[in-house]
Amino acid sequence: MTRNKVLLNNSFGRGFTLMETIIYIALFGLIMSGLFQTAYMIILNSRKMNDDLIRVNDTYFVLNKTEYYMRTADVIVEPAEGAESSRLAIKIGTSDILVERDATEKNVTVKKDSLPKIDLASGYANVEGLTFRNETAHVTANFIIDGKSYKIIISKHAP
């Protein structure tokens, strides 16, 4: 009998009042909106970081591939010695290779013999400028990619 009296006097036995229910729903809503906003920001930032990472990798791939062609060239056809050009025409063995900037796509393309041109980057990095300079002792490539300047200098002398 004492036990029944305790249960009747206990406020939990009666349930929540309307005001308590509204307050708990509001608090739950605040917590959920905070969680959703946090999840959205994490997803948004990870996508932005992924795009930035792809852009950096595109930039370095273009630079490394161009450097590879400059290093392995047997003969530099264009630009002529002492001249500057937006194209690099070289011979590697019996293959004619042309490296140039595609102004409409803002990309660097490579063409080997009669094969179609290939874009070096996936389009995330914007190549805004590219010049090659052929000097007596070295070949230089100057890039402007996404507003940043890059320079590759390759010595013509055997290593």
Image (cartoon, rainbow, N blue to C red):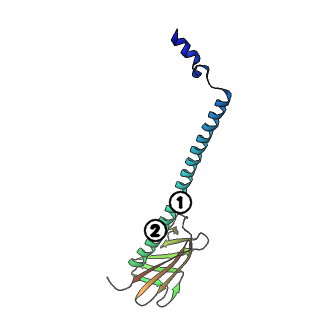
Q: Which one is earlier in the sequence, the residue at label 1 or at label 2? A: 1
The image quadrant that residue 127 belongs to is bottom right
Residue tagged by mark 2? 61
Give coordinates of residue 1: x percent, y percent. Answer: 52, 8
Secondary-structure class at tag 2: helix
Give coordinates of residue 17: x percent, y percent. Answer: 65, 26
Q: Residue at x 60, y 74 (%)?
A: 103
Q: Does residue 45 lie above or below 29 as drawn?
A: below
Q: Does residue 2 lie above or below 30 as drawn?
A: above
Kind of residue at disc 1: Asp
Disc marking residue 51: 1
In front of the other: 52 or 154: 52
Q: Residues within 10 Å of mark 1 (few under 14, many from 20)?
A: few
Q: Residue at x 62, y 25 (%)?
A: 16
Kind of residue at disc 2: Phe
Task: Say whether residue 89 is left or right of residue 158.
Answer: right
Quadrant of the snapshot with the C terminus: bottom left
Q: Are marks 1 and 2 in contact (CB under 8 Å)?
A: no
Secondary-structure class at tag 1: helix
Measure the alpha-carbon separation of dots 1 and 2: 15 Å
The image quadrant that residue 20 belongs to is top right
Disc marking residue 33: none
In front of the other: 141 or 33: 33
